[in-house]
Structures are given as structure tokens and as C-alpha cells.
């Protein structure tokens, strides 16, 4: 079944795309300027209200498009109009792979993944063996709840950002894990920010944009 775009807003278009296990997921795409990459945005935990309209995901989407990047944000299975039901992170990895295939079918521009919290855990794991995804950004990764060891030998550019008051992503465990990773890598700890980033969405968006723009400068 081919994706069927429907005009959503002036800046985004609603799409439906398949997963390998036969579900269809809803998403919103926004093509940016020529020459910039595509960003897949993965939202936080579905069982705690996470969806593609989350404040961090929405703030990232708007800021990235303003900088010329193209974006796909989508709802994991069982969220919103996406088919299926929550699958404890296993099926959600298939959702991320489906999103990557959907974008790659449409463009030859560089592809990057940005995940927030649960979205960082399942997003990065889903594409760890996919060399078409050129870099990873993990926002507030739940470092003590999920196993991120699959990233230790990953040679792609990797970026981690969290607040110093994040109870889901404590600074010391994150820094210890970061130290174990292969280069290239970078990290940023932002002061006076907790896991939810309310009122600080611009801070995390600016950090991710700095990382992505640095890939071109580098």
C-alpha cells in the first residue's frame, strides 16, 4: 500500500506508511531546503502520554524546519491513528525502521535520527545496523531503564543531551556511559532542566541543531 499524503497544515503533510509486520502508522512530514538532511523524530513513551505532538518533539520539528532540515515525526503503534498496540519497545523498533524506509524511498539526502526519552532508546537501537542513518541524537535517554550498550562500538556521530535535574537520565550514569563510547561523540548537560523540558524546548532544539550543523562544518 502506497503512502497517501493529505494536506495537514501549511508546513506539514499527513502521511501513512507501513511497517514490515503489516501495520500502518500515521506521521507528519515537512520537506525543508534542498541540500539539508531528513530527520526522523521519535517521541517519548506511549504509556505515559507520549506522541508526535509532545512539546519536545514539536519544538524540535519547528526549529529544524526553520534551519532547512526536512522532518518526519510519527506516532508509534497504538498511538493516535497508528494501527496496532504498544509492544514493549520491540514492535516500536519496527516502527522506526518503517519510518526510515519511508524517508529513504523519497530522497537521497542524508538521514538522521533524533529520539527523546523512550524514543531515543528504541530509535537508536532500531537503526544501529543501518548505515543509511548517518548520525544519532539522544535527548534525555533513559540510561538506567534500557540497555544502550549496542552503541558502544558505533562509529557514527552520536550526540547526547540532558538536563542536570533529569531523574530519568541522571547525569553521572549518562556521563559514565558516554565515556565508554567510541568516537565521534559529543554531550551537553543543560543547567536547571528536568526530564520534561517544559519552557526549555528552545534549549534542546538549539543543542540538536548545533550538533547537526557541526556535521557539515566538520
Image (spheres, helix red, strand yellow):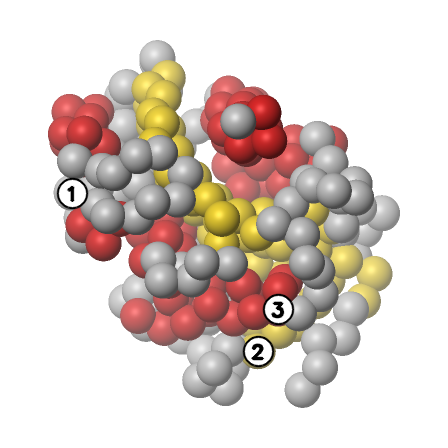
- Which is more N-terminal, label 1 or label 2? 2
State the image coordinates of residue 20 (x, y, percent, origin top left): 47, 82
According to the image, label 3 marks what residue?
102
Mark drawn on residue 144:
1
Circle 2 SS class: strand
- As drawn, 55 above or below 106: above
Residue at horizontal 71 percent and vertical 65 percent from the top: 106
Q: In the structure shown, which secondary structural element does the residue marked by tag 1 occupy?
A: loop
* Tag 2 residue: 18
User: Is residue 59 among what the camera can see?
Assistant: no
SS assignment at label 3:
helix
User: From what the image shows, is residue 32 above or below residue 111?
Assistant: above
Mark 3–mark 1 Cα distance, whole angstroms, equals 31 Å
The quadrant in which the N terminus is found is: bottom right
Closer to the observer: label 3 or label 2? 3
Labels 3, 1: front one: 3
Residue 169 in which image quadrant: top left
Which residue lies at the image location 21% right of the left edge and 45% below the top edge? 152
Residue name at image x 57 percent, y 78 percent: 18
Q: Residue at x 35, y 57 (%)?
A: 128
Q: Are marks 3 and 2 in contact (CB under 8 Å)?
A: yes
Image location (x, y in percent) of residue 90: 30, 70
Disc 3 or 2, which lies upstream in sequence?
2
Amino acid at each position: 500500500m502506497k503512502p497517501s499524503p493529505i494536506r495537514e497544515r501549511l508546513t506539514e503533510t499527513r502521511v501513512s506508511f507501513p511497517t514490515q509486520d503489516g501495520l500502518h502508522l500515521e506521521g507528519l512530514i515537512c520537506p525543508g531546503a534542498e541540500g539539508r538532511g531528513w530527520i526522523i523524530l521519535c517521541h517519548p513513551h506511549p504509556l505515559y502520554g507520549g506522541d508526535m505532538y509532545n512539546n519536545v518533539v514539536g519544538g524540535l520539528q519547528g526549529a529544524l524546519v526553520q534551519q532547512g532540515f526536512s522532518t518526519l515525526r510519527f506516532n508509534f503503534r497504538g498511538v493516535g491513528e497508528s494501527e496496532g498496540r504498544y509492544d514493549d519497545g520491540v514492535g516500536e523498533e519496527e516502527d522506526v525502521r518503517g519510518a526510515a524506509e519511508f524517508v529513504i524511498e523519497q530522497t537521497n539526502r542524508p538521514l538522521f535520527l533524533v529520539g527523546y526519552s523512550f524514543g531515543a532508546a528504541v530509535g537508536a537501537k532500531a537503526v544501529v545496523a543501518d548505515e543509511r542513518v548517518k548520525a544519532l541524537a539522544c535527548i534525555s535517554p533513559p540510561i538506567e531503564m534500557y540497555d544502550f550498550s549496542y552503541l558502544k562500538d558505533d562509529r557514527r556521530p552520536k550526540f547526547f543531551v540532558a538536563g542536570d535535574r533529569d531523574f530519568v537520565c541522571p547525569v553521572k550514569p549518562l556521563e559514565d556511559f558516554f565515556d565508554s563510547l567510541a568516537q565521534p561523540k559529543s554531550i551537553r548537560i543543560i543547567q536547571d532542566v528536568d526530564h520534561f523540558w517544559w519552557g526549555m524546548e528552545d534549549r534542546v532544539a538549539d543543542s540538536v541543531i548545533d550538533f547537526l550543523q557541526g556535521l557539515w562544518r566538520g
